[in-house]
Image (cartoon, rainbow, N blue to C red):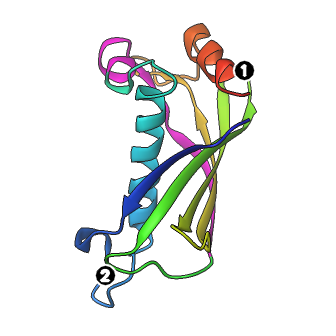
Amino acid sequence: MNAFEVPRRIRFSDCDPAGIVFYPQYFVMFNGLMEDWVDGPLGIGFADLVSRRRIGLPTVRLEADFRAVSRFGDDVVLSLQVERLGGKSLTLALQCRAAGSGELRMAMRQVVVTTSLETHAAIDVPADLREAIARHAD
C-alpha cells in the first residue's frame, strides 16, 4: 500500500528542555497524521466519524523505535502506511524521517480497532472506510 506523507516542522511545543522532541509528542503527531489521512485522501472526515457516527479508532497495541533525535526547527516528513486491514482493526506503520536526507528518526507500529463509542465494543471496519483504504492502496 502507498504511504500517506505530510511535511512538518518540529515546534517548540514538541520539545523538552534539551530542545529535542519529547517522546510522547510523536504519538500526538502521529494521531494528527491519522486524522489528516482520514480527512484527506480517504475522504471520510475524522470529526464526522467520531462525533456524528460515533465510531472510534483507539490504539490497542503500540511498538516504537526511537532512532535519532529531532530538534526544535527540524523539518521532517511523517508517513503512514497500512500494513494490515483486518475485520475490526488496522495495523499502521508510521515513520518520522528528516526532510531531505531521509534519516529515520522514529518508527512506530500501531494497531487501532474500530469501536462503537456508544458501547465501546469492537465493531467491523465500516464499509466506506474499508473501501476508501482499498482505493488508496495502489
Which SS class for mark 2? loop
Whether residue 35 is visible, yes or no, is yes
Q: Earlier in the sequence, mark 1 or mark 2?
A: 2
Residue drawn where x is 40% and y is 27% of the image: 39
Image coordinates of residue 101 in percent, x first then y, are 59, 74
Q: Is residue 7 left or right of residue 87?
A: left
Image coordinates of residue 106 in percent, x first then y, are 58, 68
- Tell which residue pokes out farthest to the front in this image: 100
Image coordinates of residue 1 in percent, x first then y, are 74, 35
Q: Which mark is residue 115?
A: none
Query: What are the residue bounds of the magenta stretch?
Result: 48-66
- Tell which residue pokes out farthest to the top in this image: 127
Q: Which residue is mark 1?
A: 87
User: Image quadrant of residue 95?
Assistant: bottom right
Whether residue 125 is visible, yes or no, is no
**Position of the C terminus by quadrant:** top right
Residue drawn where x is 46% and y is 65% of the image: 76
- What's under tag 2, amino acid-wise? Asp
Q: Nearer the viewer, residue 132 or 85?
A: 132
Q: Is residue 52 magenta?
A: yes
CA neighbours of label 1 inside 10 A, class few (<14), some (14 to 19), many (20+): some
CA neighbours of label 2 inside 10 A, class few (<14), some (14 to 19), many (20+): some
Residue drawn where x is 50% and y is 59% of the image: 77
Q: Is residue 15 above or below residue 137?
A: below
- What's under tag 1, amino acid-wise? Gly
- Tell which residue pokes out farthest to the bottom in this image: 18
Q: Is residue 90 left or right of residue 59?
A: right
Q: Nearer the viewer, residue 98 or 48?
A: 98
Image coordinates of residue 51 in percent, x first then y, are 30, 20
Q: Is residue 36 magenta?
A: no
Q: Which mark is residue 16?
A: 2
User: Image quadrant of residue 29?
Assistant: bottom left
